[in-house]
Amino acid sequence: MHNPALQNYLSRLQSTLATTNLWLDEQGRARGRYFNSTLTSAFQAIRAGDDGRIVAYEAYARSYASDDQGLNIWKLLENAANDDESVELDRLCRLLHTLNFYRQPESANLDLYLSVHSRLLAAVEGNHGMAFRRILDVLELPHPDVVLQLPLITPSQRWVLTHVAENYRRNGFRIGLHAASLEQAADLLERIRPASIKVDISLANDEQAQVRLLEQADRGQCHIIFRRIENQKRLQALRLANQTASPYLLQGFLFDLPKAALLSRDEGHLVFDYQEEFKLA
């Protein structure tokens, strides 16, 4: 551990009783309590499309389970929690994810993607991101390496998305977005100028639109992340469609399931070895 401030904070949590709202378990994994649920973090890799190297991880809030297969906390609690409670849950999850990510040496030089729940867009008042920025400053952690992912929006939420994105950006964070189509991704890229846009691989079925978007994103220094890649057929179709040099990123169950432990660099490349089968002639 090369960060004294983070190490000191984790050491204090190590001696904290599990009756509090935040503590470390026997494995050094940060856990939190919300209502009657015990929650923690799981991480899924985001990979470069050309060689499969891991460039980032996305964090997910899960109920604690020894096999890392806990339930999605937001799905369990979004109908039970009011707006103020949702803000509290969001902040707890961000802190948990930050601790569980940066305590692992494999996190070095990688980005951390954290999702912002749709209820948080309108529920948070004032300067979005300031509280989280202060936490990272205290722990001496690199906030430019954190990408805050905003949810998929409806047309009526366009102004809210723009407002929240600018507030997060002013606090030093990069912005990630979700798009419901390649066309919406192109619009968001032009209007919001995010660091990344996620597109469901099932929606990337127009080869020409896909190539145009990747070229536009390359010019705008934005990563297009194709998500929900669950089988080799979808991966092969994606690679065959994009016969340009435009880069893109990948994420999906084909490569790995969300887990508490980050993969080593060797493990991360092993799961991508089969890519040679799909190399273009």
Image (cartoon, helix red, strand yellow):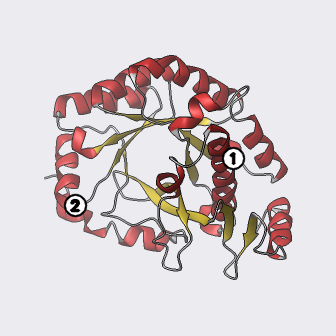
The vertical placement of 215 against 199, above or below, is above
Residue 217 lies left or right of residue 264; in this view the side is: left
Q: Residue beneath label 1, please?
A: 88
Mark seen at residue 231 = 2
Q: Residues within 10 Å of mark 2 (few under 14, many from 20)?
A: few
User: Closer to the observer: label 2 or label 1?
Assistant: 1
Q: Position of residue 212 (x, y in %)?
A: 27, 27
When asked about the image quadrant of residue 14, the answer is bottom right
In the image, 203 versus 262, the foreground residue is 203
Relative to 35, say whether 205 is above or below. Answer: above
Q: Residues within 10 Å of mark 1 (few under 14, many from 20)?
A: few
Residue drawn 45% across the image and 26% down it: 220
Query: Residue 57, relative to residue 274: is it above or below?
Result: above
The structure residue drawn at horizontal position 73% and vertical position 25%, both measured from the top left corner, is 126
Between disc 2 and disc 1, whose residue precedes? Answer: 1
Is the N terminus in the top left, top right, bottom left or bottom right quadrant? bottom right
* Viewer can see residue 58: no
Query: Tag 1: residue type?
Result: Glu
Residue 277 in picture, x, y percent from top left: 18, 64
x and y, in percent, of residue 96 in the image: 67, 59
Kind of residue sitting beneath label 2? Asn
